[in-house]
Each structure stands twice: as C-alpha cells, then as structure tokens.
Amino acid sequence: MNKRPRPEPMQVVKQRRDAALNALVHGVPYIQFLGIEFDRRGDELTAVLPFEDKLIGNPMLPAIHGGVTAAFLEVTAIIGLSWAYLWDDIESGALDVEQLVAGQLPRLPKTIDFTVDYLRSGLPRDAYARAQINRSGRRYASVHVEAWQDNRHRNFAQATGHFLMPQSDG
C-alpha cells in the first residue's frame, strides 16, 4: 500500500517563500536603490515604497518624482509577475532557494510596453502598490498595477504593462 508523503511543515514552506521573495527583490540593484520592499501574505504581494527625501521630484509641492512613481509601478508588476510565475516551483521545492540567495536569479519578465496614469500627486509619505495579472501565458503577460498612499481606494497612480515572459530552459 502506497503512503502519501508527509507534507512539509508550514514553517519550512513559509521560510522558503520568504527567502525566495527576499532574493528576488534584493537581487536587483535599482529596487534596492529605491528602497522598495514587499509584504507577503500567502501568495499576495503588496509593494511598499518607504518615503525618503531623495524620492521628491518637485520640492515646491512636495511630490514624489514621476519617474520614481513609474519605476515603483513597473517593479511591482515585474516582481508580482515573477512571483506568480515561480510560485509552483517555490511551493514544491523544485526551485533551489539557496541558488537564489547566492545571486543566481531566474530570468525576469521583460517589459514590452508600460503605460502610467498619474491620478494625483504622490505625497511625501509611504506608498503601496499591488499588481493584478490579467493574462499570463507562456510567452506574454498583461498586468495592471494600482498605487495608493493613505487610502487603499484612492489611487495616486495606476499602470498597465505588457511583458515578454522568460522561456524555460527545458
């Protein structure tokens, strides 16, 4: 009689998820420069852009620079898409997290186009964003991102992007 393998302890799975996400985020120098972090709850990611004075574009308002806002949205889309793309391999343990931590990152999706809607000025405070994958196939993906600050239902920017998905090595 075949016995089902015993499931891994949840703590082991959580540690693997956190290590993989940390390696993805901290493996890209520009993400580190901007200070973007990700809060993970299960498979849902929320990007966090902690406020710093260097992010201000117009000191007279003051407002977060439009380029920083666009980069924040694009990083959120790419990391969210990568997270979804790698999820099954992270969960099963097929993805070697030690290699990720050592800097051997998988190929990330490449931006085909990215359109940003600036809805209001980004205030000098922390910002948050979430990506919603509208379509993800073997070669192409479409993602919508919304960013807010104090009120989840009052976006200060949103974006839609199309991405070329990395081809598997197999």
Image (cartoon, helix red, strand yellow):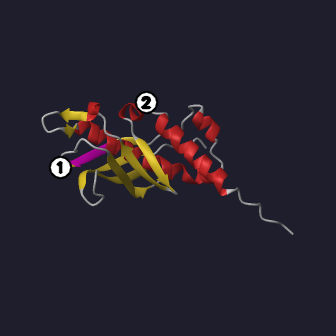
Which picture quadrant has residue 52? top left
Question: What is the number of the mark on residue 86?
Answer: none
Q: Quadrant of the N terminus?
A: bottom right
Question: What is the number of the mark on residue 120?
Answer: 1
Q: Which residue is pictured at 16% across the width and 33% down the height? A: 59
Q: Which residue is pictured at 38% across the width and 30% down the height? A: 33
Q: Does residue 104 appear in the picture of this structure?
A: yes
For the residue labelled by badge 2, is the local secondary structure a helix, a strand or a loop? helix
Question: What is the number of the mark on residue 29?
Answer: 2
Q: Which amino acid does label 2 sit on?
A: Pro
Q: Does residue 92 appear in the picture of this structure?
A: no
Give the magenta-colored segment's residue range.
113-117
Judge left or right: residue 80 versus residue 148. Answer: right
Categorize mark 2 by other alpha carbons within 10 Å: few (<14), some (14-19), many (20+).
few
Which picture quadrant has residue 10? bottom right
Q: In which quarter of the image is the C terminus?
A: top right
